[in-house]
Amino acid sequence: MDGQFTDLMAEIGAKARAAAAELAYAGSERKATALIAAADAVWQRRDAILDANTLDLDAGEQKGLSPAMLDRLRLDTNRLRGIVDALRQIAEQRDPVGRVLAEWDRPNGLHIQRVATPLGVIGVIYESRPNVTADAGALCLKAGNAVILRGGSESFETSTAIHACMVAGLKSANLPEAAIQFIPTRDRDMVTAMLQATEYIDVIVPRGGKGLVGLVQREARVPVFAHLEGICHVYADRDADLEKARAVVVNAKTRRTGICGSAECLLIDWQFYTKHGAVLIEDLLKAGVEVRTEGELLKVPGTVKAQPDDFGREFLDMIIAAKLVDGVDEAIAHIRRYGSQHTESILTENDATAARFFERLDSAILMRNASTQFADGGEFGMGGEIGIATGKLHARGPVGAEQLTSFKYLVTGNGTIRT
């Protein structure tokens, strides 16, 4: 790795460390003021942001990005309004720093509190979704953390424009501008520099495809919050309500195919299929989805024979794998084998079956009679998310402001000594 990137990382990292020290005791009002001002700046500068986005989209088309990837990259007035609303929602949330998580007295005379504290400096490495610039910056700030953002080359112009709005918000609240820094180069060597920056970065959050996340998990010396893939399943149980199932299945696959909460595999109980026929498959085909399947389902006109690796594959496109299963236990076994512990949904009116599905699967998010497209921090009331974590240490599921804190113990005595 070129020394210039090591030097740049050291410069950015030192500024972030200093900013984090100040943010750790910044008041709730100042952080909220910064986020509201950032939201105002995004809306005031929307034309400039959309112009920058057009540059990125043009470059992406020339580069041959898929329609799903271009959709992840594309901003319009409504999506910008969504960014503004998310910033305001995060500003209005209660401050996660300083929360008393637990409190107790000991027979030895000590009073002990466990109190939420910032993590410190967070590095976020992401690909083509420019809204992550605002979401990650806002959530890290809310939790009292400094953040170093390394956006994808595809969204460089758009992310740069949004980052300028975040800095404007920091200035308005008299908070250090280095609290939210954006890596000012497309060079991939800066990713390596961040992954090795143990002196400056406390946690890395990768947000992107399997290639990016796999690289980060292999090479990072810094702790990582990550999910490798979003291989999300929808299981239509024998006791599913037909109309609910039809609505959820189409939405889970087609609302936005390029997000990690998009359904990639549909499991249908044999008894549901015997009772209702191929209606769920037919709905998907009518919506323009390529359905890759096997066995009995291949008799449905328009379906395509599935290849062995289609089960357990993240398509991020108008493609879904589908399979018939014999009951909830077979569905659970399939998900355990092929899933990525991201999000699974069961469609059923049977409480006991739903309870079994919830109890016996260990994905970060389990749903009942709801679209997997709701696997999103904003939809969970977090204002936004920095990513979905599928690991089991510290944070799991949507990573919002509360998940970006650690804790410390505050112990009070009264001249108390240990015998």
Image (tube, grey):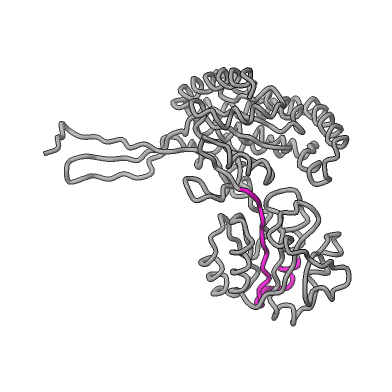
Please state, as top left, top right, bottom left or bottom right, where the N terminus lies in the image: top right
Which residue range is magenta in the image? 228-246
Image position, residue 293 (x, y; %): 78, 68
Q: How many marks overall?
A: 0
Residue 389, placed above or below residue 190: below
Residue drawn at (61%, 24%), measured in percent from left and top?
A: 181
Is residue 172 something one can see in this rendering?
no
Q: Could you say which quadrant of the image residue 131 lies in?
A: top right
Q: Classify residue 297 by image quadrant.
A: bottom right
Determine if the magenta segment contains residue 201.
no
Determine if the magenta segment contains residue 231: yes
Which residue is nearer to you in this view: 45 or 131?
131
Residue 334 lies left or right of residue 48; in this view the side is left
- Residue 13 picture location, percent across and down: 54, 22
Outermost residue, front side: 1
Q: Position of residue 179 (x, y in %)?
A: 56, 24
Relative to 302, say whether 398 is above or below: above
In-image side of 46 versus 238 (left or right): right
Residue 376 rendering spot, x and y as whole percentages: 63, 48
- Quadrant of the image containing the C terminus: top left
